Image (cartoon, rainbow, N blue to C red):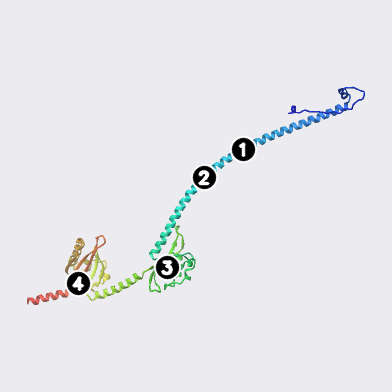
Amino acid sequence: PAENFLMIIFESKKATIGKTTDTKSTVKDDPSEIHALEQELDSTKEYLRSTIEELEVSNEELKSTNEELQSSNEELQSTNEELETSKEELQSVNEEMVTVNTELQGKIDELANAYNDMNNLLASTEIGTIFLDHDLNIRRFTPATKKIINLIETDIGRPVNHLKSNLLYEDLTNDSQKVLDDLVPLKKVVKSTGNLWYQIKIAPYRTADNKIDGVVLTFVDITDERETLVELNKSQIQFKELMKNTKTIIFEQDKKLRYTKVFNSDGNNDNNNVIGKTDKQLLPNKAEAEILENIKKKVMRTKKLIREEVTTTINKKPMHYDLVVHPLLDNEDNVLGVACTSTDITELRIAKNKLKKTKAN
């Protein structure tokens, strides 16, 4: 404020020799001095006014700056609160991440166990398996495959047709490509150079989301089964030849007494005409057919073997048979039908009758 300022003016005056006049009277008597003092006073007032205005402007600026500082302080407080909130959120996210990481570690452990189980399973089954990608390059294989195709670990990534195989099978690559194109599994029985037999199955490799990502080849050693089948075929041939030289017919019937299997048909009925039919449909004499069916029904009812001599009329001639009927049972003792052997004893019966007549005479 203006009242806080003082103005001090210094004047220089010449000394008057021999005169003792007063200063005031001198100033009053000098108009130029008064005018100079008035100008100087006006200048000082103007300076004071300018200074006051600058102070007021500075004051306003200080107030504005103070308000801005207060606003900045409030913003900083708000930012600090947001940071505190973000910190709490980050702590919560961190806790969730720790939980997810624990669960993920558990899943990794489960996956590792499943991987080990799968490896042990594939190794224990002794089934050769090769996984091929879309380009028919080897992705993975089981240990049992090494004795079929000469594979080592460094062969992973190589095309399957670059490898030497012990199989007498030149269409492995073509068939694999065909399965990859058509998505239809393929099975083949192939022989190897070691006189071993393998059943090969080529199937599409499907991912969890049902996408085709290559093919899977499995090789099952069926050498024993093949040899058994060969022996079985030989035995069947021998059995059929043996049955041709006998007068015995072996057959099976289901619970409705329909013929399901017939060995060594007697020549009066073709096997294809017998299968699926009953005795009443095959025999002209319905009374004789009913006797046969009653015997077989009793066997199914009692689950006990019955052996009887029966007579059937074929081509208007009586034929005599030694009939043995067995019950056919499943593992739970349920009746499935009957198994029968029927031996032609007509000539024996005639011979016995002739012997009786001879003894009677």
Q: Residue furthest left?
A: 361
Query: Camera-side residue: 330 or 231?
Result: 231
Front label number (3 vs 2): 2
Category of crowding for the residue at label 2, using alpha-carbon neighbours closer than 10 angstroms: few (below 14), some (14–19), many (at least 20): few
Q: Which residue is mark 2?
A: 91
Q: Secondary structure at mark 2?
A: helix
Q: Position of residue 87 (x, y in %)?
A: 54, 43
Q: Earlier in the sequence, mark 2 or mark 1?
A: 1
Q: Which residue is mark 3?
A: 145
Category of crowding for the residue at label 1, using alpha-carbon neighbours closer than 10 angstroms: few (below 14), some (14–19), many (at least 20): few
Q: Earlier in the sequence, mark 3 or mark 2?
A: 2
Category of crowding for the residue at label 4, using alpha-carbon neighbours closer than 10 angstroms: few (below 14), some (14–19), many (at least 20): some
Category of crowding for the residue at label 3, using alpha-carbon neighbours closer than 10 angstroms: few (below 14), some (14–19), many (at least 20): many
Q: Earlier in the sequence, mark 3 or mark 4?
A: 3
Q: Which residue is mark 1?
A: 73
Query: Would residue 293 be found to the left or right of residue 5 on screen?
Result: left
Front label number (4 vs 1): 1
Q: Of the residues shown, which amino acid type is indicated by label 1?
A: Asn
Q: Secondary structure at mark 3?
A: helix
Distance from Cα at disc 1 to Cα at disc 3: 76 Å
Q: Position of residue 197 (x, y in %)?
A: 38, 71
Query: Camera-side residue: 148 or 286?
Result: 148
Q: Which residue is mark 4?
A: 343
